[in-house]
Amino acid sequence: MVFNALGLESQAREVIEVANEKQLGEAIARGRENGLRLVTFGAGTNLVLGEYIDCIVLVMRARGISLHKDGSSFLLSAAAGEDWHGLVRFASAQGAFGLENLALIPGTVGAAPVQNIGAYGVELCDLFESLEAVHRESGERRTFTRSECAFGYRTSLFKRGVENPWIIWRVTLRLQSMPAARTAYKDLAQELEGFGTVAECATPVDVMEAVVRVRRRKLPDVRRIRNVGSFFKNPVVAFEVVEALRWKMPDLVAWPAQAPSQAKLSAAQLIDRAGLKGMALAGARVWRRQPLVLVNEQAKTRSEFLRLAAHVQAEVHRRWGIRLEIEPDCYPPLA
């Protein structure tokens, strides 16, 4: 089976498209009767797949969006198979604000909480209200609140690989009726200024347009160039590590982290300053415009593609003493 944005050769035991609750129930029953595990895919834009998946793969096609006022805010609910960027555009058109910084992130709504997607100073968890999920073995339905999802930096309760028993079915977000643009990121502020808008005066529409422009300029289009977006997480380190690195790199980029004694570094800068931008190995290449992205030019299998990722990790650690962690999901999990 070839079903992933990297275009790697991968074959599953069985693939079932699920568009409604009846089909989901039938798939769960099929897995239980045959003793097969179920795994859930959305658009395949955040997956690095092995050559064989000994499971039933459920491709989420469920659609449906609802929006209603709840006091001074909106509750936006969407089925797992909805396109994420389409949801962002829908919310903006309806005057429900908060998602603008997350525009043009590829993938589906159901995949968004798994990774706790984030960009330009906003994470999904900032806007999250609840989600409905179905147990992949028993069929039990459950609603998860924000605290129960255990959100972290590019992770959640649902990013547990084979240990995750839940199929996300519907996600509900709480959005604002009053605009409050988030423009602190340098790239975003510069893009706004580029088309004549002062960051402090930007509207949500301005912000979404700026985010789309930045992403299109810096990131390869997944429809034309095989990639899964950012391949490495920005490392979170102690302040002491930041100060030590600044002796070697005075312009080191560092942002505040959740813990008061830690900071988040720019993985892109670490990779770039290690001289790896544009480097090719085993059919894969570090993207020339954004070194966080690895693109697949000719690699056929996951093991081939990951040779470049391992080389980047080794060189960054050798040069800067920092260990980079892979951001996308690898399935089956790496040994």
Image (cartoon, rainbow, N blue to C red):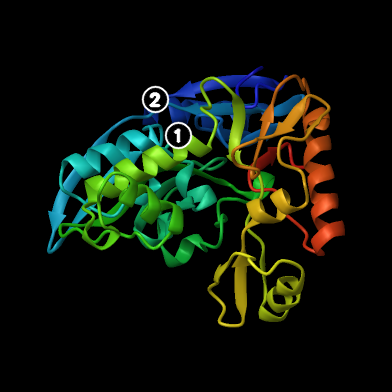
- The reply to whether discs 2 and 1 touch (Cβ–Cβ < 8 Å) is no
Q: Position of residue 46 (x, y in %)?
A: 58, 37
Describe the element under mark 1 as helix, strand or loop.
helix
Q: Is residue 109 at all visible to an observer of this figure?
A: no
| Side (left or right) of 18 relative to 210 | right
Mark 2 and mark 1: span between their CA atoms?
A: 30 Å
- Classify mark 2: helix, strand or loop: loop
Q: Residue at x 32, y 33 (%)?
A: 86
Classify 10 Å Cα crowding around label 1: few (below 14), some (14-19), many (20 and above). Answer: few
Give the vertical position of 254 relative to 213 (above or below).
Answer: below
Q: Which mark is residue 216?
A: 1
Q: Where does the image place residue 251, in percent across and percent down from the top left? A: 63, 66
Quarter of the image for residue 250 reads: bottom right
Placement of the N terminus among the 4 image quadrants? top right
Q: Residue at x 74, y 71 (%)?
A: 245
Residue type, label 2: Ala
Q: Viewer-proximal residue, 54 or 104?
A: 104
Q: Amino acid at mark 1?
A: Arg
Specify whether 161 is left or right of 178.
right
Of the two numbered discs 2 and 1 on the same chain, state the one appearing first in sequence: 2
The circle on residue 19 is: 2
